[in-house]
């Protein structure tokens, strides 16, 4: 179980690809974030929690969905860290996990045969990772 | 036959842990001419040196190789050691098996193999070493201090007090530097001018000190003990000898639009001006760019009103050439320009100011006579926000990677004097960390919080905007309560990163002193020689070497002064005998060497030489002045015939190393 | 020499991995101090690099470099102060011209110019010194042994 | 050309008989119609042997080296391209100006006997040039060849008819051959080859070398009191004629040593008995110097310092030179 969490944390870090350990927790990202007032987990915390490996806190957070990817945090960061990249990593992870194996090929018969083939491919692409 | 002694140092565990010293000893013992080899725990210790002495006597050694730390560390030690037993110090070679071997390699077998090879290279070189004798050069008993801030003033005073002549070159019209701009100083909150002015007076009046203000160093040549420096004394357009400093000219000058450098643009000044009221020398200077007389030919009011008739529009820059035994660089600092930090609104709002500008705003001699008002409205602010680390600790490329060191303390200081004088003003400091190590420093910061109710918030400011009411909206974060803040402020003070003064790099190049990537002068050793530049005869004081506060600057200036005095106390210096020399019978006299010599040490002489055929002939050959030559070796490569060689680093010596390593 | 033992022992075993010989000429004031700095900071770099101390990069005669190659060096790197920072004011400016011409000529003669590198390393750049040496050793390892400039008679 | 030769003889005789100079460096008639050799004349009478025609390619500037050593005031006939060599020797302090009397001598391009013979001509008795046509008289008859086809290689890179140094001039300047396109075309062709082929090319070229040192002896830039290759204590490899690497080293080092000094007279390649394309190495350095440090022509005067003893703060980095056409 622990390994599984660790694995997911590592996957997140790989996705984010930003030097988390360089963060000095100055808070400039959160201070300059135009949507910080809406966030449950401020950008500096998002970076901190990922550095600490607190997966649960991160996955529960709605902040990634408030983030507008304006990259102000990344621009202002004095250490070259990108909280925006962490936000994006969290979004990607959520998208990839949400429908994990939700549809498999065996369920295909329940689909409307009239459904365009392109839509089918898109559904598999999105939900069959 | 040569008898070489090889001594392998353990350096405690520093070398011995990764290098098998016994194996090194065994390996070098098999090399021809190695008459003795041994290892020892600390070669640099008394015991180690005794071992060398004893081995030299027992085995009649005539050359020594020490496998130890960097020659930059202990070459001198072992050379002295050799000299004591009658071996010429230049018959000693060091194999650097610590910094370049045991410390960079973890694998013991690899490190041992490399150590053996380095030892072999040193042995190969030492075979070709020749005894060298240092020459002597005289010491000019006069020092130069570049920069007339507190660092330069203190260094000059200490040197002068020790009885040596010292000149201060200051590019501004008056000495005083940054400290003269400050209102109060931490951690005692005493008035900066009150403690600086007496020192300025002392420097200006000291019989051993000569001030060159409004002057810049133009060129430096020579070397330790005898630098030749060209100083450009810019035309003041005022006869300093006759001027009484009455200041009538500055009052009557009709041009009033130039922003005052000393007041950091918060005030204007005339074209003829004295930078500040306590300026020394109290002699005005005409800023020719803004003077009507110089620009249009019409005006000349200052000349008419001057009771001492000392205005001289025809004055020219003067180049003064002077010789010095030692030079102190004390060029101080500037603030980082904030053009890359648009989010703080420094360019947009006059109420966003730097900490240095704030010092002027609260200074009784400043533009507001010490009343703290917002520059935009002239009204007293209700709330002030101080932002720390603006441009410091920044690895993103926008700012400086280092901590500017003084900001945390002056933030507390400034917050305190706002709260002390104006208890109704709310002061908030945003910080990443509060770094206050130092005597009575942390207590000082805590007083700001505990006694003066300054709000300290761990977090940073992300954006400063002008708001509709004419104030400032500040977006910030509070990391401890995990909140995003939107605050109102009337004034924002930016604790801006410090950087070495403009022109420091140019000066370093003239002095051939090295600098780090941030343009701070590097010290000869970060711990053991912190006030000396690696270039002999150049010493460092104050901010030009790294961020530091006033007490540290003063201590460093004192330390640099002692080093200068120690140098000037000598009548002669031993010169480096590793200099170029010309084999005259091969020299064709093409003088390519002369053209690349940076010291003018090579001259053409028509001489009678015995040519290769054994016949006497008269011809032009290159001759090296052994005192002027500093031993760079540029000439040796310029010479196509290899007639020019460098003692101590001869072609044969270097090639012996190449051959031993390949 | 240690290397000799390996070659003898390895006649029957699998060939030893290629360990390039790298000679680094370092000026006393910047680069050699930078190398010391790398050591002081315990920055690791391959043991293949052997440093020769010279007063200034301008002391390094291109002939030294050619000799090193001829004797079997697989790579030669010359380090000096950054241009403008020379302890002797102008030395590295001459070095830069001399080595530019040499590099260009080696290239013209079809000799791998990657075997020769010039880097400016200041006394404060210990970490960078280690990085440069590491990357140079990697580069030379990838290139393999120097055969074009090597004089086979010099083989020990 | 005969008119010029007559003027030269007259000038030489005048100079010698008036005692203005103690010797005259010029060319002497050889045994055949095309093997004139450099010669030093010390009396007016001897000057009867002085010749000048299209077979006087030798650059006489290096004779001034010995003249300076012997302190003999020497008149020297210099074709326009030869004058560069004199300036270079003056710059290198190898020749003292006071011992030189430089006589600018017109030239319309020197001929290459090998190229003439390559047309199948044998038993040559006389060769004359007029209006771009070379008339070759042989025992079997006469044949005309276009002059451009039989010019020496070095004349195809003619620098023009201006004298860089001359105390006096003989006759009127002649029209020199139009230089053939880009002087560096041959260098560029090799640069464009893949590295392996460049290496092979030079191995092949340089392995022809027999170390006769003719290139070194003729070169006005190679004027050292003692050549580094002759000095046992000197730090060079490449002293022996023993191994291809030694040849590479010798020619590389020689080219490096004359870089910035080489006036591009092309004599090294002309005198090479093995036909090694030595000029290419020198041209490469010239091209690099021009590209990296601005146009420079060694020998155009006796004062401008060579590019290797000057610098600018913005010079290109060595890595820039190694990068193009990596090998």
Image: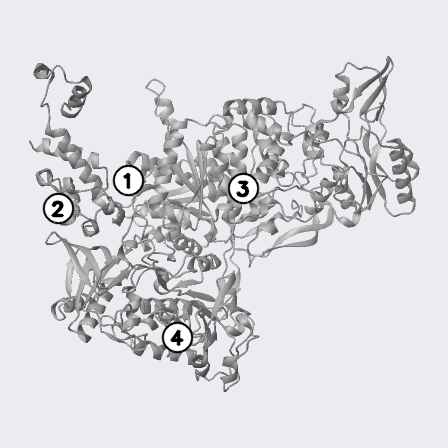
Q: Which residue is mark 4?
A: B157
Chain under callout 3: C
Instruction: Give the color scheme: rainbow, by chain, secondary structure or one colour.
Output: one colour
**Structural distance between the alpha carbons of marks 4 and 3:** 47 Å
Chain letter behind tag 4: B
**Residue B18's mark?**
1
- Crowd around label 4: few <14 · some 14–19 · many ≥20 (10 Å): many
Which residue is at the front of the view, B115 or D264?
D264
Where B48 falls versus A65 (above or below)? below
Whether marks 4 and 3 lie on the same chain: no
Measured Cα–Cα span from mark 3 to mark 2: 61 Å
Q: Nearer the viewer, mark 3 or mark 2?
A: 2
Give SS at disc 1.
Answer: loop
x 26%, y 42%: residue = B17
Which sits in the foreground, B71 or D132? D132
Query: Which numbered mark, 4 or 2, is in the foreground of this view?
Result: 2
Whether marks 1 and 4 lie on the same chain? yes
Are marks 1 and 3 in one subunit? Answer: no
Q: Where does residue D233 sit, x and y in percent of width and height?
A: 58, 39
Relative image position of residue B337 (x, y in whole percent):
35, 58
Q: CA distance from mark 1 to mark 3?
A: 39 Å
The residue labelled by disc 2 is A39
Instruction: Identify the disc placed on residue C98.
Output: 3
Q: Nearer the viewer, mark 2 or mark 1?
A: 2
Mark 1–mark 3 CB contact (< 8 Å): no
């Amino acid at each position: 179980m622990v390994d599984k969490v660790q694995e997911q944390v590592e996957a997140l870090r790989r996705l984010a690809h930003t030097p988390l350990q360089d963060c000095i927790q100055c808070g400039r990202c959160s201070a300059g974030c135009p949507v910080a007032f809406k966030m449950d987990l401020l950008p500096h915390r998002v970076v901190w929690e990922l550095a600490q490996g607190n997966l649960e806190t991160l996955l529960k957070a709605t902040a990634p969905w408030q983030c507008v990817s304006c990259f102000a945090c990344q621009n202002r960061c004095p250490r070259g860290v990108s909280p925006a990249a962490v936000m994006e990593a969290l979004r990607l992870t959520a998208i990839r996990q949400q429908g994990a194996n939700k549809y498999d090929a065996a369920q295909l018969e329940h689909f409307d045969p009239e459904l365009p083939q392109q839509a089918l491919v898109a559904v598999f692409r999105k939900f069959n990772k | 036959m040569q008898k070489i002694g090889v001594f392998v140092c353990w350096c405690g565990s520093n070398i011995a842990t990764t290098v098998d010293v016994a194996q090194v000893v065994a390996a070098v013992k098999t090399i021809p001419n190695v008459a003795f080899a041994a290892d020892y725990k600390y070669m640099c210790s008394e015991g180690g040196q005794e071992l060398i002495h004893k081995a030299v006597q027992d085995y009649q050694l005539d050359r020594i190789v020490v496998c130890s730390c960097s020659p930059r560390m202990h070459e001198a030690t072992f050379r002295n050691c050799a000299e004591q037993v009658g071996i010429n110090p230049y018959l000693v070679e060091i194999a650097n098996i610590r910094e370049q071997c045991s410390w960079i390699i973890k694998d013991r077998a690899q490190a041992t193999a490399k150590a053996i090879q380095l030892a072999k290279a040193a042995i190969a070189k030492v075979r070709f070493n020749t005894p060298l004798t240092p020459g002597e050069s005289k010491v000019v008993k006069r020092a130069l201090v570049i920069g007339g801030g507190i660092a330069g003033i203190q260094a000059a005073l200490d040197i002068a007090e020790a009885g040596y002549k010292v000149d201060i070159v200051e590019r501004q019209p008056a000495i005083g530097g940054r400290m003269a701009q400050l209102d109060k100083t931490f951690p005692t909150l005493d008035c900066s001018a009150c403690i600086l002015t007496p020192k300025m007076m002392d420097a200006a009046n000291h019989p051993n000190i000569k001030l060159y203000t409004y002057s810049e160093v133009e060129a430096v040549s020579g070397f330790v003990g005898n630098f030749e420096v060209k100083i450009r004394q810019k035309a003041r357009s005022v006869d300093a000898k006759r001027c009484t400093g009455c200041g009538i000219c500055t009052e009557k000058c009709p041009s009033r639009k130039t922003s005052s450098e000393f007041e950091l643009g918060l005030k204007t000044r005339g074209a003829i001006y004295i930078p500040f009221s306590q300026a020394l020398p109290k002699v005005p200077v005409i800023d020719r760019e803004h003077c009507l007389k110089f620009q249009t030919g019409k005006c000349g009011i200052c000349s008419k009103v001057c009771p001492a008739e000392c205005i001289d529009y025809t004055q020219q820059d003067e180049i003064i050439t002077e010789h010095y035994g030692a030079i102190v660089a004390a060029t101080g600092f500037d603030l980082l320009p904030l053009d890359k930090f648009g989010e703080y609104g420094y360019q947009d709002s006059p109420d966003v100011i730097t900490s240095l500008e704030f010092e002027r705003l609260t200074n009784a001699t400043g533009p507001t006579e010490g009343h703290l008002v917002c520059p935009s409205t002239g009204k007293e602010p209700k709330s002030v926000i101080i932002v720390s680390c603006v441009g410091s600790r920044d690895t993103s490329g926008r700012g400086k990677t280092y901590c500017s060191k003084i900001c945390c303390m002056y933030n507390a200081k400034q917050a305190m004097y706002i709260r002390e004088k104006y208890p109704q003003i709310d002061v908030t400091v945003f910080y990443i960390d509060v770094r206050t190590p130092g005597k009575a420093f942390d207590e000082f910061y805590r007083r700001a919080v505990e006694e003066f109710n300054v709000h300290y918030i761990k977090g940073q400011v992300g954006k400063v905007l002008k708001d509709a009411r004419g104030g400032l909206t500040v977006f910030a974060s509070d990391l401890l309560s995990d909140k995003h803040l939107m605050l109102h402020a009337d004034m924002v003070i930016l604790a801006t990163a410090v950087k070495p003064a403009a022109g420091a790099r140019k000066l370093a190049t003239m002095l051939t002193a090295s600098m780090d990537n941030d343009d701070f002068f590097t010290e000869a050793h970060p711990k053991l020689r912190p006030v000396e530049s690696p270039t002999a005869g150049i010493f460092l004081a104050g901010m030009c070497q790294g961020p530091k506060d006033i007490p540290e600057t003063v201590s460093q200036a004192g330390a640099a002064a002692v080093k200068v005095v120690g140098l000037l106390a000598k009548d002669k210096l031993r010169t480096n005998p590793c200099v170029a020399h010309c084999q005259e019978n091969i020299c064709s006299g093409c003088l390519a060497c002369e053209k690349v010599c940076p010291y003018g040490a090579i001259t053409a002489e028509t001489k009678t030489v015995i040519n290769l055929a054994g016949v006497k002939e008269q011809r032009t050959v290159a001759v090296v002045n052994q005192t002027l030559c500093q031993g760079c070796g540029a000439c040796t490569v310029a010479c196509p015939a290899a007639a020019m060689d460098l003692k101590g680093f001869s072609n044969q010596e270097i090639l012996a190393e190449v051959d031993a390593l390949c | 020499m240690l290397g000799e033992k390996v070659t003898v022992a390895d006649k029957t075993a699998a060939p030893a991995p290629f360990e390039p010989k790298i000679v680094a000429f370092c000026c006393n004031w910047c680069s050699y101090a930078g190398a010391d700095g790398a050591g002081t900071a315990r920055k690791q770099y391959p043991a293949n690099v052997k440093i020769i101390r010279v007063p200034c990069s301008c002391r390094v005669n291109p002939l030294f470099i050619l000799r090193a190659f001829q004797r079997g060096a697989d790579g030669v790197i010359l380090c000096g102060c950054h241009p403008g920072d020379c302890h002797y004011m102008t030395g590295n400016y001459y070095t830069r011209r001399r080595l530019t011409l040499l590099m260009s000529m080696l290239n013209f003669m079809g000799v791998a110019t990657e075997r020769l590198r010039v880097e400016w390393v200041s006394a404060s750049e210990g970490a960078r010194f280690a990085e440069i040496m590491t990357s140079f050793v990697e580069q030379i390892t990838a290139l393999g042994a120097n055969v074009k400039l090597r004089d086979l008679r010099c083989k020990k | 050309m005969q008119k010029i030769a007559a003027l030269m003889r007259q000038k030489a005789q005048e100079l010698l008989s008036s005692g203005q100079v103690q010797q005259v460096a010029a060319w002497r008639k050889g045994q055949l119609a095309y093997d004139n050799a450099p010669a030093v004349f010390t009396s007016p009478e001897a000057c009867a042997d002085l010749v000048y025609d299209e077979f006087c390619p030798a650059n006489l500037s290096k004779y001034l080296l010995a003249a300076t050593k012997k302190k003999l005031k020497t008149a020297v006939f210099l074709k326009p391209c030869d004058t560069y060599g004199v300036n270079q020797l003056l710059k290198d302090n190898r020749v003292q100006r006071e011992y030189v009397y430089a006589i600018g001598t017109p030239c319309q391009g020197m001929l290459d006997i090998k190229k003439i013979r390559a047309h199948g001509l044998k038993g040559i008795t006389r060769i004359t040039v007029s209006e771009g046509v070379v008339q070759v008289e042989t025992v079997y008859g006469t044949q005309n060849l276009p002059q451009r086809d039989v010019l020496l290689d070095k004349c195809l890179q003619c620098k023009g008819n201006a004298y860089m140094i001359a105390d006096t001039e003989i006759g009127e300047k002649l029209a020199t051959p139009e230089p053939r396109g880009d002087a560096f075309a041959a260098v560029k062709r090799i640069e464009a080859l893949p590295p392996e082929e460049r290496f092979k090319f030079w191995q092949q070229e340089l392995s022809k070398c027999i170390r006769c040192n003719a290139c070194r002896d003729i070169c006005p830039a190679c004027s050292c009191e003692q050549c580094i290759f002759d000095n046992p204590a000197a730090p060079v490899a490449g002293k022996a004629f023993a191994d291809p690497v030694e040849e590479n080293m010798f020619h590389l080092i020689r080219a490096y040593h004359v870089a910035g000094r080489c006036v591009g007279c092309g004599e090294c390649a002309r005198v090479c008995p093995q036909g090694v394309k030595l000029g290419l190495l020198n041209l490469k350095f010239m091209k690099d110097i021009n590209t990296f440090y601005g146009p420079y022509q060694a020998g155009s005067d006796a004062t401008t310092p060579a590019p290797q003893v000057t610098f600018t703060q913005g010079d290109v980095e060595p890595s820039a030179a190694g990068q193009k056409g990596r090998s």
